[in-house]
Amino acid sequence: MLSTPFFPSSARLALSLAVLALLGACASRQPYERPAMDIPPAFKESGAAAQGLWQPAQPGGGQAVPTAWWSLYGDATLDTLQQQAAAGNQNIAQSVARLRAAQAAVASSSASLLPSLGASASSSRARSGSTLQADGSSNARISTSHSLGLNASWELDLWGRISGTVDAARASAQASADDLAAMRLSVQATVAQTYFSLRAAEAQARLLRETLDAYARSWELTRNRQAAGVASLADVAQAEAQYKGTQVQLLESETNRSQLEHALAALVGQAPAAFSLPATAELPAPPAVPAQLPSQLLERRPDIAAAERRVAAANAQIGVARAAFFPALTLSGSAGYRGSELSNLLRAPNLFWSLGPALAVSLFDGGARNAAVESARASNEQAAAAYRLTVLTALQEVEDNLTAATALAQEQQLQAEALAASQRALDVVNNQYRAGTVGFLNVITAQASVLSSQRSLIDVKNRRLAAVNTLLKNVAGNWEPLAR
């Protein structure tokens, strides 16, 4: 038996090792710096041409973007759809579940920093081997054993392996939180754009119905003129072909509208059969986008933040891999009672205990640890490249849509002027046809030009909304990231 002064010495040893563990963990943690990026001071396409779209910054840091950024469109139906999507979208629900799993992983890895304590109780009855006596009896021995005890163990984090794992798990959880914010933002933008496309399809369908009414009148006029002998059967056939072809276009627009309504139903978490949206055929006006600097984009976009956190997680794994080269030190202890009689189990003679450290290190592994470190470094470089790509893609997305939105605003104006000119030409040709100075082919050509200009104008409005919608998505990253 060991003398009683051993226990205080063991306690002092445990305390010394604990302090050493903390110092060693801090010293061996892999240092982290955010990957360097050369960010321009301003966007290339935010010049004078974009001033009507890109609002100038206000004193003190720029325009504030409302959390409900889609409210800038002033559409109550869109507001309702966004509320439904926030509550029912299944992509968001998946991201929420992934965040919970990541947070549970942080709690699980953090638990390894603390000692573990367990309890055990057992009871057994055993028969030992026997020999046959001369009188025919057996000397078999039957023994009973009862035990009740506690055991504890604690792996000291001398080299930062456990703390590095916790750092990696925490950074991954932060990335999952940013992924959730990015998913919400993506769903919001998708709902808005799908809604705009649906309204554009309704506008196309309304235009085609109105055009069919006009074509029906032209067809009737041509039949009357053919009956009066002033128009040919070819004119009647051309009028009929024009009418039937427009009916086909109307069916396509109505089909497109139905499919977009189904897509909206899925986005808000409802079955298409249970979802219906009254038709208005009205597109909202694109709002001005609050001005932002490229550096602000890095602070606002949650997908960029998620990519940066994945770099931090990969960086922490390098320290974890390097710590495998050093020995693992575990303190363990146990205490309890063991005896043959259950009624007298909890007595001093039955008391047992043990306490001591254990050191374990791998002396030869065929290069596995070196390979693990190299793999961790490669993963870190991959994550850093992915981060830089995310930043560059975000900057490109803003530049592209600044260019597109600015050009589409000008294109919308020119397309409106082209439509007015086509309408004037159609009025002239209609009068000439009634006077008999031109053939019906001229009327069909002029009518087709007007319809094409009208459809193109609706399409330009929708594409302009898409560009502005993407810009708003890029500057609308209002979210609360987890503590860094």
Image (cartoon, grey):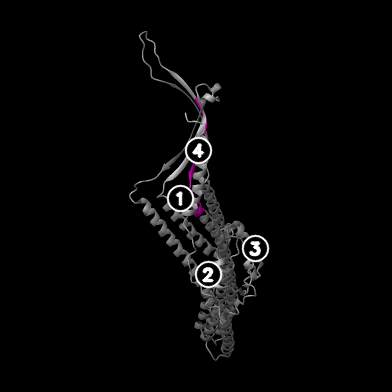
- Label 1 SS: loop
Q: Residues within 10 Å of mark 1 (few under 14, many from 20)?
A: many
Rendered view: 147 above or below 426 = above
- Label 2 SS: helix
**Between discs 2 and 1, the one toward the N terminus:** 1
- Residue on which the image places disc 3: 80
Q: Are marks 1 and 3 in contact (CB under 8 Å)?
A: no
Name the residue at 50% across, 68% down: 391
In this view of the protein, which residue sits in the foreground, 111 or 99?
Answer: 111
Q: Quadrant of residue 201?
A: bottom right
Query: Label 4 amino acid?
Result: Ser
**Between discs 2 and 4, the one toward the N terminus:** 4
In this rendering, which labeled residue sits more in front, label 4 or label 3? 4
Residue 444 on image: x %, y %: 53, 83
Asked if residue 96 shows in the view, the reply is yes
Query: Label 3 amino acid?
Result: Thr
User: Which range is magenta?
Assistant: 146-169
